[in-house]
Image (spheres, helix red, strand yellow):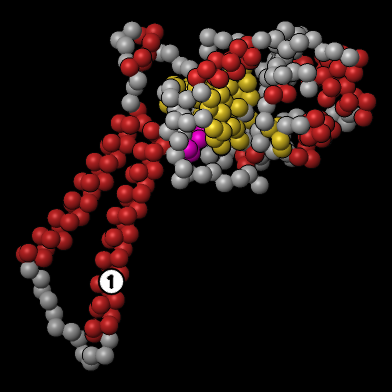
Amino acid sequence: MPSAVPVFDPASPQAEAIYDLFVQVLLISAGIFVIVSGLICVALLKFHAREGQPEQDFGSHRKEIAWMVAPVIIVLWIGAISTKLVLTLNATPPMYASSDAGAQDTVDLIVTGHQWWWEIEYPGTDIVSANEIHIPTGKKLRVKVRSADVIHCFWVAQLARKIDAIPGHENYVWLEASRSGIYQGRCAEYCGIQHAWMNFKVIAHAPEEYEQWKAREQSVPQPPEGQLAEAGKTLFMNLTCSQCHAISDTEATKSYAPNLTHVASRLELGAGVIENSPENLRTWLKNPQALKPGCKMPNFKLNDEHLDQLVAYLETLK
């Protein structure tokens, strides 16, 4: 099963604000619970052995005011820290605060939810990836979130709040990482049989490393070397693979399934089902349904020779 999401280890100002609000509300709730439970215990112990009804207390104005003022103060405090959270989550960086309409409409990433994988586009570049989002640290990025089929929910617990991906409607969320690392993302809205395996990674790089990654992603993979890899490319184009997937600088240009231009450099296969390695890639190609039942990629019943060829070719796509 998917690993747990470390929601108590925030790695961005937005996630830290959510965490702070949670802790404060938890402490306030715990305090109220202790007070109320304590009064109940006192009443039980004090009047447990007595016969008859205890002396009635019809109250006083002071007590009534105290019971009224305390909850009002608590509600106002929770309202204040909640407002601070909303302002933190929706704060617009200076570079987007320009009155120029073009700057306000700028997005850094376009994330599209599919059953059951994520497509990531980097506007202004030719980079299209799947199930991995690469970002620079220390920069607040505006992300457009949308869906190609049903309602999904984009959630990176350590970096940002949840945002729904709704068919026919575009939502926006800010994404930022304070430190380098790999952060787990999930779909947080039930979307079908493989909802649990609709995961993704956010990989935060130092700014100079991010630029290096972006340069590599914009490069075209080298032509396959060796008869096995060349045969694999020919097979890929002749089979229905090229009718669903895209690979830069080839005849494969469809976007029904994940873009495979740099698939060999990705960490996982099947939106988090297994780690990416030649052995696991072969297992996935042999029968995707065995690893991810109900996924959109069928079992093509490839023989060992075809599997060897396809793996050899796909492993060149780095």
Q: Height in image: 161 above or below 127?
A: below
Image quadrant occupied by the C terminus: top right
Task: Point out the stretch of residues depicted in magenta.
Answer: 153-158
Can you tell which quarter of the image residue 308 is in?
A: top right
Q: Height in image: 124 above or below 165?
A: above
Name the residue: 29% across, 60% down: 31
Q: Height in image: 33 above or below 142?
A: below
Name the residue: 28% across, 36% down: 84
Q: Is residue 286 magenta?
A: no
- What residue does disc 1 label? 38
Q: Position of residue 137 (x, y in %)?
A: 47, 25
How many residues crowd around disc 1 within 10 Å: few (fewer than 14), some, or many (20 or more)? few
Q: Position of residue 49 (x, y in %)?
A: 26, 90
Name the residue: 69% across, 24% down: 265
Name the residue: 35% across, 28% down: 90
Can you tell which quarter of the image residue 259 is in?
A: top right
Number of numbered discs? 1
Q: Is residue 157 left or right of residue 259?
A: left
Closer to us: 222 or 51: 222
Q: Is residue 110 left or right of residue 48?
A: right
Q: Is residue 156 magenta?
A: yes
Label 1: which secondary element: helix
Q: Is residue 204 visible?
A: yes
Amino acid type assigned to the residue bearing label 1 in the image: Gly
